């Protein structure tokens, strides 16, 4: 997706060979018009997949997920990282290690909002080692629902998450595939 | 806003005289079409206020904020509750006590994305005791920016947050004003 690659080139900051900071338009400040383009593109790619629900994870997945849900006309469900007083039922949970934050979190979804008739599109801002995606897939399976595929805004292709999802047979659509951050320069898989 | 009040009546769950659970369309599962209506309404109310930026707080504020930002054509900045490896600059911070979660959090915004030329619309999902709103206002002032006003999806008018903001002279626009949750019934200020 050219508009996204251009934004990454112009406003992304390479912090190391492993870490790309996109706080200017995705992870802290959000560009709503770009999110709409992203949502439209995910909706186009999964238009014929029978998607009934989108699942993402707080917080940075919410903006692209909501724009995709708007276009596809389906609800968005976001996994929570911390238990809330108003989210007290028997929860579906999975453990996820955050590479960026170097912390282990339990993420949770209420089974009230996900069931075996759902075909789920997983949306997330980043795919690196795939820990968040695998946790969401685990929760979706616990609910008896089906994974229609994954929509990733930025994939760090040099880390192992994409290859693992491919080997598991999941459809993955990444709108920007970063081949390398070496030398402070972002290069993409075209 | 009638569509929102109807949704609260139909899908909101009164957990106590103090707590309204709206996990079906706002705080866990999100209804994108309703969020678009909400964003359009905030944009209409603040169309002539010279808003240059929207500030909200993760996670449930993001969906209504992004739809408002899309309509107004301005960026959305969300305060983070936990420090991230990629958010490492000198941060603007404030402390906020969450009534719902009964925890004290530090929320943070990077000064790179907020400055003295900004006129800020604060968007949040709930206004109860106003702790989150006051924390965001504190951060906006630290940046030298101006508060154009606040846009709240659901106000619990029987708690003190609204009255305090009124007394401080801020414009507050709440799309649903809950007068009472007594007896398990939601009644609104019309």
Image (cartoon, coloured by chain):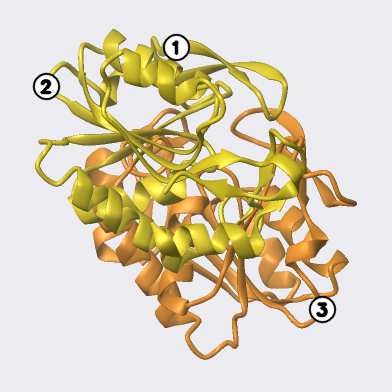
Chain colours: A yellow, B orange
Tell me what residue is drawn at x 40 percent, y 21 percent: A136
Considering depth in this image, is A12 or B45 the residue closer to the camera?
A12
Q: Which residue is mark 2?
A: A117
Relative image position of residue A91 (x, y in whole percent): 40, 13
Q: Residues within 10 Å of mark 3 (few under 14, many from 20)?
A: few
CA separation in Å, label 3 and label 1 = 43 Å
Tell me what residue is drawn at x 60 percent, y 60 percent: A9
Q: Quadrant of residue B86?
A: top right
- On what subunit does the disc labeled 3 rest? B
CA separation in Å, label 1 and label 2 = 19 Å
Tell me what residue is drawn at x 52 percent, y 91 percent: B48
Q: Quadrant of residue B143?
A: bottom right
Q: How many marks?
A: 3
Tell me what residue is drawn at x 42 percent, y 28 percent: B15
Q: Which residue is mark 1?
A: A93
Q: The N terminus of chain A lies in which quarter of the figure?
A: bottom left
Relative image position of residue A3 (x, y in whole percent): 44, 65
Left or right, residue A48 beside residue B189: left
Relative image position of residue B94 (x, y in whole percent): 82, 49
Is residue A36 in sight in this rendering? yes
User: Are the numbered discs 3 and 1 placed on the same chain, yes or no?
Assistant: no
């Amino acid at each position: 997706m050219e508009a996204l690659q251009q934004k990454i080139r112009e406003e992304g900051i390479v912090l190391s060979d492993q870490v790309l900071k996109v706080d200017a338009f995705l992870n802290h400040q959000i560009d709503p018009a770009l999110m709409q383009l992203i949502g439209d593109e995910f909706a186009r790619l999964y238009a014929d997949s029978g998607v009934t629900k989108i699942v993402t994870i707080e917080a940075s997945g919410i903006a692209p997920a909501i724009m995709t849900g708007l276009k596809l006309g389906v609800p968005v469900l976001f996994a929570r990282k911390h238990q809330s007083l108003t989210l007290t039922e028997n929860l579906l949970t999975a453990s996820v290690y955050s590479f960026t934050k170097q912390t282990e979190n339990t993420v949770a979804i209420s089974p009230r909002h996900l069931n075996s008739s759902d075909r789920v599109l997983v949306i997330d801002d980043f795919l690196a080692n795939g820990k968040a995606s695998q946790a969401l897939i685990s929760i979706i399976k616990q609910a008896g629902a089906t994974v229609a595929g994954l929509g990733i805004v930025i994939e760090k292709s040099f880390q192992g998450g994409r290859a693992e999802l491919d080997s598991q047979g999941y459809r993955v659509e990444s709108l920007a595939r970063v081949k390398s951050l070496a030398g402070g320069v972002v290069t993409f898989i075209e």
